[in-house]
Image: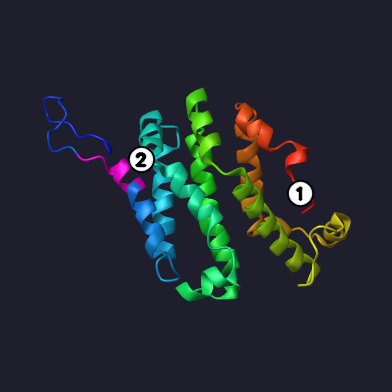
Amino acid sequence: MLREQVTVDGNINAKSFDFVSHMSRMVGDFYKIFGATSCDMGAQLVDTLVEVIQGPCPGNQIALIQAKIIDSSRDFIAGFDTAEDLLPIGFTEDDFANIGEFKSGFVTLLLSLLEGDLDVDKVEKMANALDFKVVKDRLLAVFTHFAKEILERDDINMETLNVNHVNDKLIKDSFEGGINEAFELYILMQTLAANSETARNNITRKTFNAE
């Protein structure tokens, strides 16, 4: 019904409107106006799209993919990582967790697109559209922030960080915050890799740098 409305006779209404594809295009346009004052609205839009495809709903999944939602999700995951990105659009350096939660919505959206019977073409399309370097860079950004908070230090060199030092500082609630985005990104990469050679080739150990 969200994609095409029917008459009482069961025929598709000539004035039928595809809300699903329209919302997907709205996400692409939203990138241009994203900022501190519009973040909550964008998060609601993404949450709505997640709701319409979970279950899953194959027709809505296909509609979103055709309306370029993978490209839009990639752009948001890749962007808005640094103070130079965030300060001009109204955020402060204390807003990292909020940005992480917003980005995490896109990762959930991508994972929701893969729910149900995994279609090879759909998996390959996502694997080819996603820039795995972007995903890895985002993983690094999230974990760097996590390590700084856990170790209460800003002068961390991620190439030489001893993970045991982080483990020693973990407490019961350590994984309650933005680090969940990193877990979801990792699950997304592994899900794609299990069904796509393109993705699999991007997560072999030799494709990762020291960080």
Mark 2–mark 1 CB contact (< 8 Å): no
* Residue 90 seen in the figure: no
Q: Which mark is residue 67?
A: 2
Q: Is residue 40 left or right of residue 131?
A: left
What residue is shown at x 53% (from left), y 35% (from top)?
128
Residue 57, percent across and down? Answer: 40, 32
Q: Is residue 63 left or right of residue 91?
A: left
Residue 84, percent across and down? Answer: 56, 72
Dot 2, crowdedness within 10 Å: few (<14), some or many (≥20)?
some
Look at the image and tell me in which quarter the C terminus lies: bottom right
What residue is shown at x 38% (from left), y 64% (from top)?
33
Q: Which mark is residue 42?
A: none
Q: CA distance from mark 2 to mark 1?
A: 34 Å
Which segment did they paint magenta? Answer: 17-24
What residue is shown at x 53% (from left), y 39% (from top)?
111
Q: Nearer the viewer, residue 57 or 95?
A: 95
**Secondary structure mostly taken by the magenta-highlighted segment of the chain:** helix
Q: How many marks?
A: 2
Q: Amino acid at mark 1?
A: Asn
Q: Is residue 112 left or right of residue 135?
A: left
Q: Nearer the viewer, residue 144 or 79?
A: 79
Q: Amino acid at mark 2?
A: Ala
Residue 161, percent across and down? Answer: 84, 59
Residue 125, percent across and down? Answer: 49, 32
Q: Nearer the viewer, residue 202 or 100?
A: 202
- With respect to residue 111, does 32 lie above or below? below
Residue beneath disc 1: 209
* Residue 128 seen in the figure: yes
